[in-house]
Image (tube, rainbow, N blue to C red):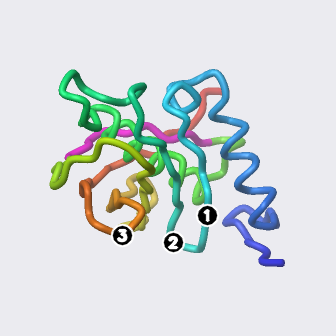
Amino acid sequence: MCIFTLKYNRMLDKTTLLKRFNDRAKNSLMETLEIVYTDIGDDFLTAQMPVNPRVHQPLGQLHGGATAALAESVGSAASNFFIDSETQYVNGINLSINHLKSKREGMVTAIAKIIHKGRTTHLWEIRVVDEEGQLIAISKLTNIVLQKNR
């Protein structure tokens, strides 16, 4: 069993941590798009989304907005791994995405990897790939770490 020691002295196994991420996605866009967090490590978070008519644009291809929602969802969730959720929260402040290949059906996987982990900003690279590992889209997401009002 892999144990993660989080920044604020919390220890959780991978299964528990992924369950928490997936539970937080209920009643949200992530649930609507059927996004599921599937793997986590010290510097990455992975999520999957099925490609079906629910996420198609009118020509029957994966909608770029759905791909962007997947990328922002996994990158924003990943920043939560590095903050004190009792006193801080994360907001996305910039998302750029390049769509490189179309997809009509199957599954896409987004892998968010940390590029910069600062005190107030996090920069993530998110690669969206198909079942064969072919690059569908690549994205960069900047998150800001904010203090909760007490």
As for residue 126 lying within the magenta part, the answer is no
Return the residue at label 2.
43
First in sequence: mark 3 or mark 1?
1
Which of 94/103 is in front? 103
Return the residue at label 3.
133
Q: From mark 1 to mark 2, how far is it between C-alphas?
A: 11 Å
Is label 3 in a helix, a strand or a loop? loop
Residue stretch rendered in magenta on the structure: 88-96
Q: Which mark is residue 39?
A: 1
Q: Nearer the viewer, mark 1 or mark 2?
A: 1
Q: Which mark is residue 149?
A: none
Classified by dominant secondary structure, the portion drawn in magenta counts as strand
Q: Position of residue 106 (x, y in %)?
A: 43, 48
Q: Quadrant of residue 131?
A: bottom left
As for residue 94 lying within the magenta part, the answer is yes
CB contact under 8 Å: marks 3 and 1:
no
Q: Position of residue 38 (x, y in %)?
A: 61, 57
Indicate whether 137 appears above or below 26: below
Type of the residue with mark 2: Asp
Is label 2 in a helix, a strand or a loop? loop
Which of 20/99 is in front? 99
Q: Quadrant of residue 148?
A: top right
Is label 1 in a helix, a strand or a loop? strand
Q: Position of residue 32 (x, y in %)?
A: 53, 25
